[in-house]
Image (cartoon, rainbow, N blue to C red):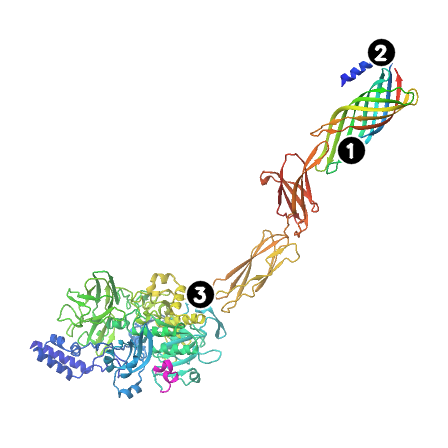
Amino acid sequence: MKNYSKVFLYIFTGMLIISFSGSGNYLNGTDQRGDDPGNIKSLHHHKLIGPLKEILNIYRNEKRLTTESLLKYGSKKLQNIIKGAKVAAQPPGSTLSKEILSYPPKRGKVNLSTGDILSEREVESKFKRPFFISALIRDELQERWGNPPYDVIECNIDMTGGIQVLNNFNLKIRATSEFEGKTIVSAEVASTEIEKIAKLSQVIRITPVLKKVSQNNLASNAVRASRIRLKSGPKYTKGYTGKGVIVGVIDSGIDWTHEDFVDPDTGETRIRYIWDTEITTPGRTPADVFGGVLSGLSYGTVWTKAEIDGGSCTEVDTNGHGTHVSGSAAGNGFATGKYTGIAPNSDMIFVKGLDNNGILFIYELSSQLGMPCSVNMSYGPGYPMHYMSWWPQDFPADGTSSEAQEIAGWNVSYGGGHIPVKSAGNEGHWNTYTDLTGGSYPYMNGSYHMEGHQSSGAQSHTYTVIDYTTVWPYNLFGGPDNSVFPWLSFGYWSDAPIQITFTSPNGFVIGPFLHGTDGGTWDGVVGDGWIDWYMDNPPASNGDNYGSLDLYWPYWGPYQPALGNWTIIVEAIGGGSVNYDVWCSEFIYAGGYYVNDINSYFTGNFSHSNYIIDEGASKYEISVGAWSTRDKWDGSDGSTWTYAKKPWVGTIADFSSPGPSRDRRVKPDIAAPGQIILSAASKDAGWSNSNLDPDGRHGQMSGTSMSAPITTGAVALVLQKFPERNVNQIRGSFSNWAIKDNAARSMGKNAFGSGKLNVLPLNRDAIAVLTQDRIEVILDNADKSVNFDGSKSYDPEDFPITYLWVLEDIPEGANPEFIIDNDKATLNVDPEIEGMYRISLAINDTIWDGPKTYSQWITAKFIPVLPPAGVNLERVVNNLIFVNEYVNRITWMENPENQVELLNYRIYRKVKGNGDDTYELIAELDPTVMGYDDRGLEEDQYFTYKITAVSYRGKESDPVIVSN
Amino acid sequence: MKRIIYTLLAVVFVVSYSYSMTLTGGVGLGLGMVSNSDLNETYGNGFVYNTYISFGIAGQFSLGIGYEGGYKKDGDVGIFDDVATLEISGFQLFAEYKFKSEKLVPYLKLGYGYYTVKNSFTSEEMGKYEFSEKGSGIILGGGISFPLSKSFFITGEVDYLFLEVKPFINSVNSGGIRLLAGLAVKFDI
């Protein structure tokens, strides 16, 4: 009786829970309560009669009615009722799309002017509204399926081919992508069709397309883009400005009236198209306007440039995120001249709504326009840790998810010049801030991720469960109790089947739970917690295994698992080698709401690396982390603000998601400024005075959402110069150019990727073209000047050039004259002194730091004296009758090539065979004399002679040597 | 040389003591030639004079001693035409035999000369260069004397001097023909 009483009490409680719970649809369609787009795993809206029938059946079969039998033999639905919480019933063979709420990153703010501290909850309360989900074609669906409510799931269907078979089902194909031999179909499918489609032989898998949220807040110009462009008036006219490139942005909306998106010369918008995916106008969808490849995009409203210029566009950005992102990427600062984006002369295409089909839209239209494009995606699942622990199958974190491959397929088909840029996410917890509250934001000495790489044996990890009675919302709702309790989830990936064993703080061993086994609830109350495990999944398309487990406490007290350190032991089944990753998160069921919060985490043998969520892990996307360029800003309220987690300038932002990818590729690819970034503020977004700049047209935000558009703009600069470059090439360029300072090196590649984004090397040095009318000056001549001309020097980017002329070297004692006239110079050499002069010209394009110096040597010399020609030596006997005199007769001729007036000829003589230092000058002869008799010699005397010519300036020629 | 002179004096004395002697003194002037072609080409012929005294002994024979001098010629020597001077002078011992004749008295002469050949030249390159070399050689000659009176005679003489000198390596014939015209006076002693 006691047991029966307890059972009926629980059943009754469960019924009450059902009746008073929110009516959210567990298949995450639009929540009918309006602006709440859908709760995570909201309660199934059961009718009471169903569960009661089931309970009666169990009693008939088992002859007993206990909590254990209900949990053991009851359906999932009944179990959930009994538990009072969990949803996520999964039809076999398919996965469901998920909805999450989006919240800004949890951080408070500090008013440096007043000292006031705003808590994170107050920040959230100021947040206007969450982001919209992807638009549903309501009218069309209503026509096909009748009146709502109905469940429509946006998902990707991976097929081997034969997609025409899908026409037999209630779905709407939006787009297709070909990648690695499969067709990825982006479609909106009625939930009732999912199971049937999953059974088709052509279907490989069905993956929900998660609704995205922006990765907000905080960003700047440390990437040096400002140094490789020049302004003339209000517009940038030279250098790298993104001219000729499309910057595409997929985001919350854009304030197209903002002057930063207007061409200062024409007053016209720079936005070519806006596709508002959230409001459908018949006849104005991409399918209607463009057709062709975009024929599947039969939702939303396309606004053309003409309509935007005409003012008929009704799209607005009430969130502010998209306008801010667009400003960072492509704003031209025309509004106030204060804040300019990276690619101020680019054209733009904007997609409102966090819809990956926007990539196809932008790629296709850019291709039609004949322009390369970079596409910014500053969004992702709102709670990646949550997803990675609950539905790891959707986040392989190695680029093999359906969404990532869909994007990859488009990249491959459109080829180079189409570059997607992805924010890395705000799930980091780097110790790169100062807690100004004195403890409200302690550094997390743990992680949401652990990993193991063993060749054999088991690895032990520690997971610490905190006391949730002190944590919001428990303290608001008075829990934990049967209506307010934590649910701790663990999701894993491994390259071999694993088994997981839990040991509670009190020593109770729960498990092992083996991969490949059916999910269920650990029988009986064992230890300090209950485990549900879902480990019977088939291998993923990448060949790896995945699964998830939940740790919780049943519906009776204390309603939370045992507090303290849990030991989790992971090993390969059979004891072999395995590489695995496990992520943790929790959600808290609280009074009909599901709130994601992460308070318990791994504290022993953990990894601070959280693999980037799947889309950023793809090789076909450039993922961007965020680093801090400033730690405070001025608000329009006249105060100076910082964050309660005051960032350390120069290093990685504390929130920037770390890499690597799960397959150990470096991610993020690069880091760009993303902390306290000032950019365009949408007039419709309701900016707080603290975040709005005093100029009223710009505001500050932080997040990898800001670092991504800076990189998107940087990609546009690269495409301006190299329109055909693909992702790998641009990634390689960024890697080569990245600034690898102390911060980047010390924090490592998991934080910064290749380093800090730097586009300065795009700029080419000015090319010096230095000419001179001669390089040799004959001092005997009247003209002793050399004219230098550097006017043909040029800068490839047409930046202005400065000339710096320097007379570097002169002969000793010379007194030349060097006259400079901007790009020309004249050297008048010293007329009396021979020697070498060196002139250098330094060209600086005023952009690059280091000037290029080019030197030219000038030789100043007198006309060279040439030695006599035809020198001949003969021995002559002079008969003096009584005695013979021996004479060495030297004869020569005047050198016909000698142009200089001679002073004399010199005859040197040495005894033949002696050293050259024994030469003696024996004669200096008039230049008209062409011979010399060396007389008075003995018959056996032999000499060597040197004959030189000497100019009137005393310059002596090289000698001619003769000997007898 | 001294012995020869002393011997001649002794002979003269003995003969004069035994016979009646005559003493003739004369001087001749004329042309001296050099036989060496190089010397001749360079220096050419020159003036010479000859003074002598002779002692007539035993009728037509006479012994005499004389001095020739006066040959001093400049010339351009060698390939450089250095200016050089050649001097030839010296003493002679001779014997004469006069033929009997009323008017023109031919005579033959045989002598031996002791000469000095001096040669000097100057060039810019080598400066001054000279040597003085002695040599001797036979003199052969003959002539005709024409008495103007009992004591005075006019003579005409042709001599050939054989003279080789070798100041250095080369031996050079410095002799040659002498053509002399002179005046002599005879004394009986």
The mark closer to the camera, 1 or 3, is 1
Which residue is drawn at the image coordinates 71% and 32% (left, top)? A883
Disc 1 is placed on an element classified as helix
Q: Are marks 1 and 3 on the same chain?
A: no
Residue A213 placed where, x, y %?
31, 76
How many angstroms separate mark 2 from mark 3 (CA)?
A: 139 Å
- Is A945 rendered above or below residue A135? above
The reply, left or right, for residue B177 in relation to residue A903 is right
- Amino acid residing under circle 3: Pro
The range drawn in magenta is: A282-297
The mark closer to the camera, 1 or 2, is 1
Q: Indicate the chain on which mark 2 is placed.
A: B
Residue topped by disc 1: B40
- Is A808 rendered above or below residue A911? below
Q: Residues within 10 Å of mark 3 (few under 14, many from 20)?
A: some
Q: Residues within 10 Å of mark 1 (few under 14, many from 20)?
A: some
- Amino acid residing under circle 1: Asn
Residue A604 placed where, x, y %?
23, 63
Q: Which mark is residue A761?
A: 3
Disc 2 is placed on an element classified as helix
Looking at the image, which is closer to me, A648 or A267? A267
